[in-house]
């Protein structure tokens, strides 16, 4: 444990004792290390998906950023987008490479289904 004796006399000015705060910080550090270990294990053990799907959740650039860690050359993404799909599509063209097939939605005339393959960031 870290020696806080030099600043301990000033601890009375805080609502928590300095030792309690230090103990909390050490506990948080341990939890963070454990969480990172779990994330590393999951990323190593989880196979890449064949298909990624989502309904209108976020803009295309944001969705692409979330998807790219899981995409392989054989992964296909099927995304439903609403009436702003053209504007979002224009935003993504400058930062991403991908192949896309657009199909009109059966349930909403202003929406489309985007089927994406070969998603990657522009170099």
Image: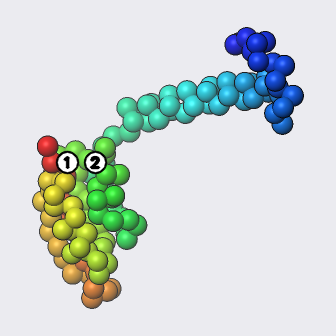
Residue found at the very far right of the displayed protein: 12
Q: What residue is rendered at 16% in x and 61% in y?
A: 93
Q: Residues within 10 Å of mark 2 (few under 14, many from 20)?
A: few
Q: How far apart are the alpha carbons under marks 2 and 1?
A: 8 Å
> Marks 2 and 1: which is nearer the front?
1
Q: Position of residue 32 (x, y in %)?
A: 57, 31
Q: Position of residue 112 (x, y in %)?
A: 25, 77
Could you say which quadrant of the image residue 57 lies in?
Answer: bottom left
SS class of the residue under badge 1? strand
Quadrant, the N terminus: top right
109 horizontally vs 73: left or right? right
Q: Which residue does the numbered mark 1 point to in the structure image?
A: 121
Q: Residues within 10 Å of mark 1 (few under 14, many from 20)?
A: some
Could you say which quadrant of the image residue 101 lies in?
Answer: bottom left
Residue 14, placed above or below residue 80: above
Q: Choose between 34 and 59: the one closer to the eye.
A: 59
Q: Is residue 51 visible?
A: no
Q: Position of residue 31 (x, y in %)?
A: 62, 30
Tell me, yes or no, whether the two marked residues, 2 and 1, touch with CB atoms within 8 Å. Answer: yes
Q: Choose between 79 and 18: the one closer to the eye.
A: 18
Residue 67, placed above or below residue 4: below
SS class of the residue under badge 2? helix
The tag earlier along the polypeptide, 2 or 1, is 2
Q: What residue is rendered at 35% in x and 51% in y?
A: 66
Residue 35, placed above or below residue 50: above
Q: Position of residue 96 (x, y in %)?
A: 18, 54
Q: Which residue does the numbered mark 2 point to in the structure image?
A: 68
């Amino acid at each position: 444990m870290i020696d806080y004796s030099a600043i301990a006399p000033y601890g009375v000015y805080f609502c928590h004792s300095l030792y309690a705060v230090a103990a909390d910080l050490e506990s948080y550090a341990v939890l963070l290390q454990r969480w990172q270990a779990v994330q590393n294990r999951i990323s190593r053990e989880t196979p890449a998906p064949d298909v990624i799907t989502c309904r209108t959740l976020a803009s295309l650039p944001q969705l692409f950023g979330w998807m790219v860690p899981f995409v392989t050359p054989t992964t296909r993404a099927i995304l439903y987008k609403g009436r702003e799909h053209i504007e979002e599509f224009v935003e993504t063209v400058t930062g991403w490479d991908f192949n896309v097939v657009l199909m009109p939605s059966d349930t909403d005339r202003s929406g489309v289904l985007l089927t994406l393959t070969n998603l990657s960031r522009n170099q």
